[in-house]
Every structure is written in structure tokens, then in C-alpha cells.
Amino acid sequence: MSRLRHIAHDNLPTLMKTATYYVIHVCVAAIVAYLVTGNLWASLTLSLLEPSVQAVAFFFHEKAWARVLARRAQARMSSSVPVVA
């Protein structure tokens, strides 16, 4: 399996969450940009640029939080295990 496929397979839930977040974000951004500019092309351009950057940032944000939560769980497990001498 290629490296990219392996990464996608290992992160499928986060990638799916990122994709749905992206679609919602683009729709909201397009509506807001259109209301502000009154220009369909400008609103579509703006609505695709910013959410694209946000989607990448969101993916890494989720991965960072997953690590934090895993470390906390690991620390709890380590502190609750009695030491046998």
C-alpha cells in the first residue's frame, strides 16, 4: 500500500470529518461573501480559498488533540497501576 493510502486509511474518520466540515464551511463562506460583496464570482473565489486552508489546519488540529487525549489517558493508566517491588 502506498504511503498516502496508508495515511488515508489510518486517518479515515478524521479525513471524513474534515471533508464534511470543509463542505459546510465553503457553503457558509460563499453565502457570507455574497452578502458582503454582491458578486457571485468574488464570493465563490473567497469561499474556496479560506476554507481550503482551514481544512488543512483543522486536520492537524484534530491530530494534535488526539495526541493530547492519548497522552492524558496514558498518564492516567500509568498512575493507577500499583508498583510491585
Image (cartoon, grey):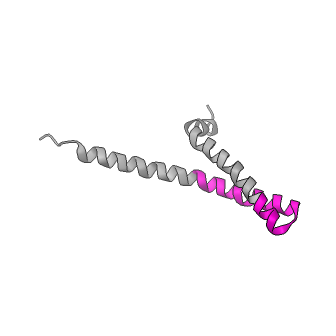
37 to 54, vertically: above or below: below
Q: Residue at x 87, y 60 (%)?
A: 40
Q: Position of residue 80 (x, y in %)?
A: 24, 44
Q: Position of residue 64 (x, y in %)?
A: 50, 53
* Extreme-left residue of the structure: 85
Q: Position of residue 22 (x, y in %)?
A: 68, 50
* Extreme-top residue of the structure: 1
Secondary structure mainly formed by the magenta segment: helix
- Would residue 8 appear left or right of 45 to someone viewing this image? left
Q: How many marks?
A: 0
- Would residue 8 appear left or right of 23 to someone viewing this image? left
- Magenta segment: 31-59
- Would residue 83 appear left or right of 30 to someone viewing this image? left
Asked where in the image residue 53 lies, by quadrant, the reply is: bottom right
49 to 19, vertically: above or below: below
Find out whether residue 26 is within the magenta segment: no
Q: Residue at x 29, y 43 (%)?
A: 77
- Image quarter where the N terminus lies is top right
Q: Residue at x 86, y 66 (%)?
A: 38
- Image quarter where the C terminus lies is top left
* Extreme-bottom residue of the structure: 36
Find out whether residue 32 is within the magenta segment: yes
